Amino acid sequence: MSERFPILISRDDVIFPGVKKVLEVGRRFSVSSVKAALDHFSKNLVIVVQRNKEIDEPTDKDFYQVGCLTKIKLLGRDEEGCLKISVEGIKRAKILKPSLTHLKINPDLEKAWYSNVEFFEGEGKSGTAKTLESFKEFVESKPAVFDCDSSEYKSILSDLDTCTKSDLPELVDRLADLWPKNEMSAVEFKQKILEEPSVNKRLKIMMEMEYISDDIKNELDSRINKKVSKNISRQQREFYLRERLKAIREELGESSSKEALLNKIRQKLKQKAFPKQIKARIEEEIRRLEYTSSYSNEAVITRNYLDWILDIPWLKSSKDEEDLGKVKEVLDAHHYGLERVKDRILEFIAVQKKLQDPKGSIMCFVGPPGVGKTSLVKSIASALNREFVKISLGGVHDESEIRGHRRTYVAAMPGRIVRALKQAGVNNPVCLLDEIDKVGSSYNGDPSHALLEVLDPKQNDKFSDHFIEEDIDLSKVMFIATANYEDDISEPLHNRMEMIYINSYTGKEKLHIAKEHLLAEVLKESGLTDKELSIDDDALEFIIQKYTKEAGVRQFKNCLSKIARKVVKRQIMGELEKEHVTLDKVESYLRYPRYDFTVKDEVMIPGVVNGMAYTEFGGDLLPIEVNYVAGKGNLSLTGNLKDTMRESASVALAFVRANEERFGLKSKEIDWNNIDVNLHVPSGGVPKDGPSAGVTISTALISSFREEAVSPSIAMTGEITLRGKVLPIGGLKEKVVSAVRGGVDTIYFPHENSKNLVDIPEDVRSQVNLIPVKEYWEIYDQIFKKEPTTQP
């Protein structure tokens, strides 16, 4: 009884039962057959071979009617849609009525070959004991036509000791599969073996072909000698060898195309400059390619290797901009503010130019998303007149992504560093290592270990890529990394880089950036002019406050682009010619506001104190609420608090309990074992973490227990210890800006953060009273007591 299967028509690969192979599938009808097998036929695919491999669109007369049923597995897909599959032969199959058609159960699939198939009866029957002995003698004689040093031949040889008659069919098929492709009539021979149901006759055919092969070799050698003798001089040995090789290629039908390829490679070698050892390596690979068959896997690997090694800019450099003043002008034109960052960049560039052989540190820009880290690196490249390339490291978890794959692997290629050099076309580009804090690791290795060599100025002049296998000089490349979170960078990488911090922008800075840069970019992208679209400052500030919540200006630009697109649409529809967007028009373009910042309460409530938070979006006021009820001495924490903040709450409560007399709580006769304290931080949907709320929690606890309210115009930040010391925190600039925006006029902060006051804009500092404290008693005295408390 016949079954229907998809058919893959191979150009020259005959598949035998029990044999495993990897095939590349590129023709459309072949790709469709593979997809049909994977999706609808339980990965079963019948493979047949063409009678003439040069035919691109075979008919049912152009392929043999006996093939092999196989189980397939998809290994990969390249950019051109070609598939790589592994196949394992199962049993011989006879094609009955092949047709090129659509699959009924999936009509969207392109046309492919399908056919009813019958399988050979009794295919698994073994031969006789005499046949087994004959086969052993034949294999052990090591016929000249086979590659007796191959692992498969050696495997067959080792299996002879334990094989029985039942193993004979598979062993004969495995040996037939070793018949080399460059032998005369290889496909016809293998097909004859495949079509023969008798094991005895298969072995007989194979033994006969061994002797025929010797005759063919002798005849072919004679013909080559005759051709060579007409064209060469006996005194010129090299010319003789080349002519002989040429004649061999003519017999194989590959002369013209291969010569053209070799000439093209030699021309490239002459046109470009290469280091001495690289030039020698290229010449060695060219010689290897000359003596390799065009149809072999080794030839494909060698050609791919030559393409890469020839395209690397080994000695080609671009000329840097020498005028440091012009570099500063470009940076100022592209980025507003960031004066300390720009000064550090100019210092870095100045040192690089001063040294003949610079081996300075690698810069790493650290800051929240959208603050301009990537665009700043692009500006550096533009200012220096260097090429810019970007390597995205986010999610990379395989060391081979950096170092490349060894040439022996299927579809091997160099790592991202070498690919970036090829893209740049010079050996001294500015190379951005984007999101270096998001590099992962897996069983395939840790990419950060490979980056250690890249970012070490003392080692990167001899960077080793597994694919290229030659030292590559990266010392002229200006590597600049970016990261969102410094703590996520591995310690060895961190030590090799200089951290340059880019803080979030204030509302005033965002307004200036919009007027100087963003509006012009948006107008250009939308095809508008400044006469066709203008936006009031009040409208811009409203958009910043109500429609964006970010440290940078990405969302802000998206909002401006949305307005511009709507204006263009209304222009095209004839509704208006130009638009001036005022505050009252913003909602008509952007709908209702999406965000709102926290403002201080107008009512004084005991147990409520303003803290300050620092997030990837900037800063915000963070009210802390405390209450207590009768209970069993428990501390309940709500508001989606993470571990560090929970620990801060525990420390604060322990500090308050230990000093209840000094805080005036003794008179309240609080029985700590019979009350439950509840601490809540609003916006429970947002996770909160960090130690900086310690002083705020302590103040909220004291306020609740004393039943004395703290002014909502006061905010505070700082980590607290069990002894009441106030430790430094991060993000002071963002916290102060957000507090002032929320209506706060007094802020307590750690004394050790006084050095960070210079980062706060002058217009913000002038609106608030900033009070540095070393110990919590200073806060307590000013809020709850008129007379200073005796220090513990």
Image: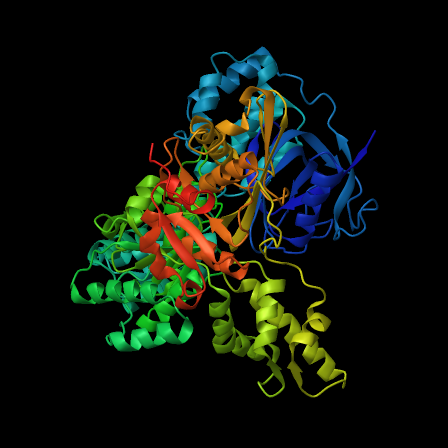
Determine which quarter of the picture holds residue 18.
Answer: top right
- The answer, for residue 169, to whether it is visible in the render is yes
Q: Is residue 240 above or below residue 271?
A: above
x, y (%) of residue 148? 41, 29
How many numbered circles are shown? 0
x, y (%) of residue 190? 58, 36
Along the line of sight, the residue nearer the viewer: 227 or 678 = 678
Asked whether, in this view, residue 270 is left or right of residue 148, the answer is left
Along the line of sight, the residue nearer the viewer: 135 or 602 = 602
What's the colour scheme? rainbow
Determine which quarter of the picture holds residue 267.
Answer: bottom left
Q: Is residue 591 above or below residue 179?
A: below
- Residue located at (47% from left, 43% from top): 784
- The answer, for residue 12, to whether it is visible in the render is no
Quarter of the image containing the C terminus?
Answer: top left
Asked whether, in this view, residue 475 is left or right of residue 303, the answer is left
- Residue located at (53% from left, 46% from top): 710
Quarter of the image containing the N terminus?
Answer: top right
- Residue located at (79% from left, 50% from top): 101
Along the line of sight, the residue nearer the viewer: 686 or 492 = 686
x, y (%) of residue 20? 56, 32
Q: Is residue 516 above or below residue 252?
A: below
x, y (%) of residue 530? 57, 85
Asked whether, in this view, residue 111 is left or right of residue 643, the answer is right
- Residue located at (72% from left, 52% from top): 59
Along the line of sight, the residue nearer the viewer: 238 or 635 = 635
